[in-house]
Amino acid sequence: MNQQVVNRGGMEEKYSILISYLLADPGANIIQLTKDNIQIQAKTQYSISHFSILQIFNGVIITWKAKSPMGEFQDKWQFPENLDQHQMAKKVASDIKFKFENFGNHEELQRRINNAMDELKF
């Protein structure tokens, strides 16, 4: 498996489109590169995100972890290695956006539940 990645120019070459999406943020950098794994970290003034791209047999696993004032988030995706990388990036971005949007909705929902419970107290 590692030799296949090397034969295709290494992780940077094989997943260049996906990597370019993850490096699009000005604060993003590759922090580790091995034969089968790339670690990317993106820092802003208020948050830090960490992506891992791991080559597995006939596939790739992308993991994401983030810390911000809103809390901690994480997700994991597994794709066939030959799937269009634009599709991979679109799915990752869509799921991250969904998590952040639902985080806010969850907080609002919890606030409403708490208010309703307080009103029921005698």
Image (spheres, grey):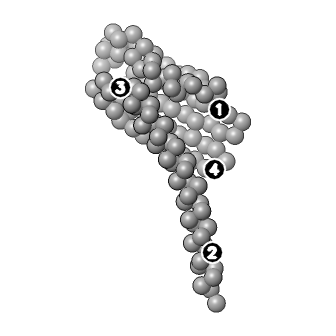
Pick whichever of labels 3 and 4 is earlier in the sequence: 4
- Residue placed at 30% from the left, 24% from the top? 82
Identify the element where label 1 is drawn.
Answer: strand
Question: Quarter holding the C terminus?
Answer: bottom right
Gap between marks 2 and 1 measured at Cα: 36 Å
Pick whichever of labels 3 and 1 is earlier in the sequence: 1
Gap between marks 2 and 3 measured at Cα: 47 Å
Query: Where is mark 3, residue-wise?
Result: 84
Identify the element where label 4 is drawn.
Answer: loop
Image coords of residue 21 (percent x, y): 51, 26
- Of discs 3 and 1, which sits in the foreground? 3
Residue 56 visible in the current orientation: no
Identify which residue, 44 or 105, lies in the foreground: 105
Query: Where is mark 2, residue-wise?
Result: 115
> Which amino acid, mark 2?
Asn
Question: Which image quadrant is residue 79 in?
Answer: top left
Image coords of residue 36 (percent x, y): 40, 21
Badge number at residue 70 = 4
Gap between marks 3 and 1 measured at Cα: 27 Å
Residue 99 visible in the current orientation: yes
Gap between marks 2 and 4 measured at Cα: 21 Å
Pick whichever of labels 1 and 4 is earlier in the sequence: 1
> Which amino acid, mark 1?
Lys
> Which amino acid, mark 3?
Asp
